[in-house]
Image (spheres, rainbow, N blue to C red):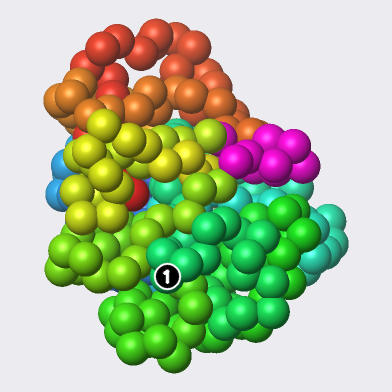
Amino acid sequence: MKNAFVMFVAAWLAVASSSGVRSEDIRGLKLNQSTVGLLASEPGLAASVLEIANALDHTDGLRVLPIIGRGSLQSINDLLFLRGVDVALLSSDSLAYVKKNNLYKDETGKIAYLAKLANVNVIVLARKDIAGIENLSGLRVATGPANSDEFVAAELVFEALGTKYERVPTTGNSSLSALLDGRIDAAVFVGPDSTLLLNSLKANSGLHILPISLPEGLAEIYSPAILSHTDFPRLVANDTAVETVAASLILAVFDWPERTERFYKLKKFNKALLSTYFATRNSEQSTNFSAAVPGWKQYLTAKDLMGASKPSQNSLTTITLQ
């Protein structure tokens, strides 16, 4: 039995064709029904968004348009209010920051997620004479601009640990250069570019990764994570490990109700994820896409589709971020 939305569209098209509506309008309606705007919350995630778009394009008539955003906080705003943004690839701790600071009041209840793609480690790099986060009180710490994932992580983690610091709004290469030059005392790194950047450091750089034990107050936002010598051979000694915390990289959506146009579009996108993207992933270095994300509700289509098709070892994603 056809759903109500499909019946409505069929009826509209029949009326349109009999009433002289321009063929361009009909073509535009069909195109928009199957076009999904997929937003990378920051440029470092562009390759991942392109990979998903290429895998899903033309599946069940889908067209996926990659979009580059300006940080996870801005991406939540875009999901809530911006036309053309249907799905956003972002860090899960951004929602906790939005709620904590009451940025959108009751609007945060309108956000959900389709799937978890990876863990995103929070890395605090500092001079070797600084032993821990608590020693950064009053010191200069690069946490990126106010819309960045580094900023969100620093605000949540440092506050939970009771460390008040002097914020420096740089990130990436600028932060690393400032740290090496002694202009700042520590820097926060989050996201896919961190591993390559930090592994570009020369041996004996005088820097190290600070350990972070998961504060009790952040247990519903982050999970414990371990960084090894294999991850950062020039920053973590062989046969040792550094404890830190990790958020989740997720596909977030607006919580459209059933029987709406956007609901059916997201359901089509979600089905394509299962059939063409997740189903072809290599199980090595993967994370279970059906895993729960603390602090987030799962979107209705994801619950239904994953319940009907239990994830197998192949239903995993190979996106691995540090």
The residue segment tinted magenta is 213-223
- Compared across the picture, whether 148 is left or right of 165 comes to left
Q: Could you say where residue 49 lies in the image, as x and y percent from the top left? A: 27, 55
Residue 266 location, quadrant: top left
Relative height, residue 1 to residue 135 (above, below): above
Residue 269 placement: quadrant: top left
Residue matched to label 1: 127
| Horizontal arrangement in the rendering, residue 95 relative to residue 232 (left or right) | right
Q: Nearer the viewer, residue 318 or 3?
A: 318
Position in image of residue 107 (x %, y %) = 76, 58
| Residue drawn at (75%, 47%) of the image | 109
At horizontal 66% and vertical 60% (from top left) the residue drawn is 134
Residue drawn at 47 percent across, 40 percent down:
243
Query: How many numbered marks, from 0 up?
Result: 1
Residue type at the position of mark 1: Arg
**Depth order, front residue of 285/11:** 285
Q: Residue at x 34, y 28 (%)?
A: 287
Majority secondary structure in the magenta region: loop
The picture places residue 36, in percent across and down from the top left corner, at 37, 54
**Quarter-wise, where is residue 157 in the image?**
bottom right
Label 1: element kind: strand
Observer-nearest residue: 160 or 94? 160
